[in-house]
Image (spheres, grey):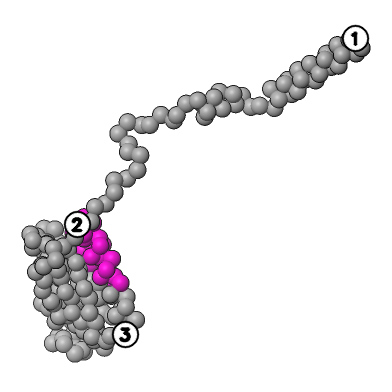
Amino acid sequence: MAQGDDRTLAAAETAAQSLSAANAKEEPAGFTADLSAATGMQPSRKEGLPDQPDKAVRRRLPDERQAFIHHFSVGGYEGYLTVGLYENGQPGEIFITMAKEGSTISGLMDSFATVVSLALQHGVPLKVLCDKLSHTRFEPSGWSGKQEIGYAKSLMDYMFRWLALKFLPRDSRPVESASITEGVDPTSQAAPVSGCSTGRLCGPT
């Protein structure tokens, strides 16, 4: 009986050794070291890099604030741009009210104004917004009736060029690399359109 138990124990030890040897062959080089590092060591943090980006802090406007309303008309679309100001006179919110209430463009402008207001209150500089959104081209577009702006390539173009004129110093205002009149022959006598006296900048009808 004892001899049988010894044989069983020896067979079990041999099987265990064979299984360990087989596992060792299947493990790739460095597997044990990687496993130890994963279970016993924390990954090293590079100096100077935070765990996550800094959280943006919203700076709300006071309950009573100064504001002004600006009327605009671009491509037959009229509306009002309301700008709420911080104590230092810088814009902290905008509201865009289109004359055609209930239209698709009115809803888009209302949502867009909310996004811009939140961006301003979370520290996005007005210059960044003006640089990104000025001179964007899409309909409706047309002559603005403002000498400082002239032809507005879109509602966004008009609003942010006007905001730049109102709140940014001259050397910080957005500029366009190519003028709208680039490629137009200044000597051409195109027929004038409504609101244009010469037809040279208005282009052919």
Q: Residue at x 13, y 77 (%)?
A: 70
Residue 186 horizontal side relative to residue 4, left or right = left
Q: Of helix, strand and loop, which one carries label 3?
A: loop
**x, y percent for residue 84:** 14, 68
Q: Nearer the viewer, mark 1 or mark 2?
A: 1
- Comparing labels 3 and 2, the label whose residue is closer to the camera: 2
Q: Residues within 10 Å of mark 3 (few under 14, many from 20)?
A: few
Q: Which mark is residue 59?
A: 2
For the residue labelled by badge 2, is the local secondary structure a helix, a strand or a loop?
A: loop
Mark 1 vs mark 2, CA separation in Å = 86 Å
Q: Amino acid at mark 1?
A: Gln
- The residues colored magenta run 111-137
Q: Is residue 24 above or below residue 130?
A: above
x and y, in percent, of residue 160 in the image: 20, 68
Q: Earlier in the sequence, mark 1 or mark 2?
A: 1
The quadrant the N terminus occupies is: top right
Find the distance from the CA under tag 3 to the CA under tag 2: 31 Å
Identify the residue under disc 3: 102
Type of amino acid at the residue the image marks with label 2: Arg
Q: Position of residue 28 (x, y in %)?
A: 64, 27
Is mark 3 in CB contact (under 8 Å) with mark 1?
no
Q: Is residue 8 above or below residue 86?
A: above
- Residue on which disc 1 sits: 3
Disc 3 to disc 1, how far (Cα)? Answer: 97 Å
Q: From the viewer's perspective, tell me whether residue 134 is left or right of residue 172.
A: right
Query: What residue do we see at 52% from left, 29% from top?
Result: 38
Callout 3 amino acid = Gly
Q: Residue at x 23, y 71 (%)?
A: 157
Q: Position of residue 106 (x, y in %)?
A: 29, 80
Which mark lies nearer to you, 3 or 1?
1
What is the quadrant of the C terminus in the image? bottom left
